[in-house]
Amino acid sequence: MEKNRIKYGSYPTIESFMDSIRLYPKSKRNEAIGEFLEETYKIYNHRNYIHPDPLEFLYCYKDPKDVEIVALLCSSLAYGRVSQILKSIDKVLSPMKQLDISPRTFIESGSKSDFKRIYSSFKHRFTTSEDLIAMLVSIKKMVEKYGSLKDGFLSYYDDSNYLEGLSGFCREFGIIKSFFPDPIQSICKRLHLFLRWMIRFDEVDPGIWKGVPTKNLYVPVDTHMLRVYSILSGDTKSSSGIQVAKKIRDFFATWTPEDPAKYDFSLTRFGIRKNNESLI
């Protein structure tokens, strides 16, 4: 591997890989893509490739009740330039560190007026201080009602209608449009990123929600993942919302039906690690 250059396995770009198998028959091409996905996963799905990524904040906490709260906050702010995302997350978590209390204790012991006082000047792109405060209050209510975010999620979980259950989970947070669009209609990249972190377990994803199947997970779709999908699949048709999310999920389920989101982290390293100003 060239120094300071991220490659897709043995290939400098994903396009160069596809060029190498362009004349293969479809069955052989699918086999080659599967091998390529596994090679990329084995190379990049490691902790040392996490930075810069919001996921790195989760590893500062050990208690699952803290991790799930931090994960929801981090994933909810995971849009825009990576460097700004990391700064915004740090602004959210710093008051907890300064008070020397855990995120869970901060949420449980804090009131709406406390959150307003602490985060009155907060802003991350389209996310305002009011949005953040509404999120913190909603997390507090869910923890009080169910005991944890996981138990709140499981109260709506439906193995046969995953998106409908997910929509119910989102409704618990009320209308915070910058955080929770309807997963039945929208891509919901940040929500699916949160669930990938919580449900998948490997060297990168913490997977603290034990017992929840990975087979229903959606790939978090951003511009980079959409580009990767388009190149690998050859699908250049225009689509939006949940339809594109379903297409991408089904595409990767061709190789890992029990874990469609498996390759998300490794395939997005190139777009995120090229420089800290990359968009995610």
Image: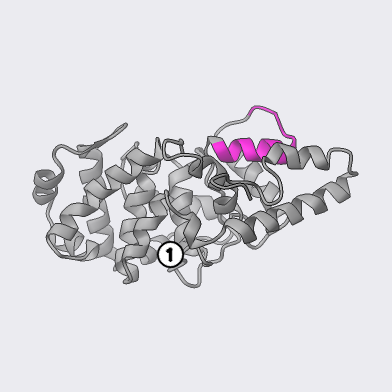
- Most distant residue in the front direction: 3
Q: Which residue is mark 1?
A: 154
Q: Is residue 233 magenta?
A: yes
**Predominant secondary structure in magenta?**
helix
The picture places residue 278, in percent across and down from the top left corner, at 46, 36
Say whether residue 90 is magenta.
no
Q: Quadrant of residue 253?
A: bottom right
Residue at 57% across, 47% down: 3
| Left or right: where 280 falls relative to 254 | left
Q: Is residue 129 left or right of residue 277?
A: left
Instruction: Name the amino acid, label 1.
Output: Leu
Q: Nearer the viewer, residue 222 or 46?
A: 46
Please, is residue 55 above or below residue 268 in the view? below
**How was the colour assigned to the protein in this rendering?**
one colour
**Residue at the spot x=87%, y=50% of the render?**
28
- Residue 17 image point, x, y percent: 75, 42
The magenta span reads 224-238
Identify the residue shown where x is 72% and y is 56%: 255
- Crowd class of label 1 (few under 14; some 14 to 19; many from 20; radius 10 Å): some
Q: Is residue 183 visible?
A: no
Quarter of the image for residue 19 reads top right
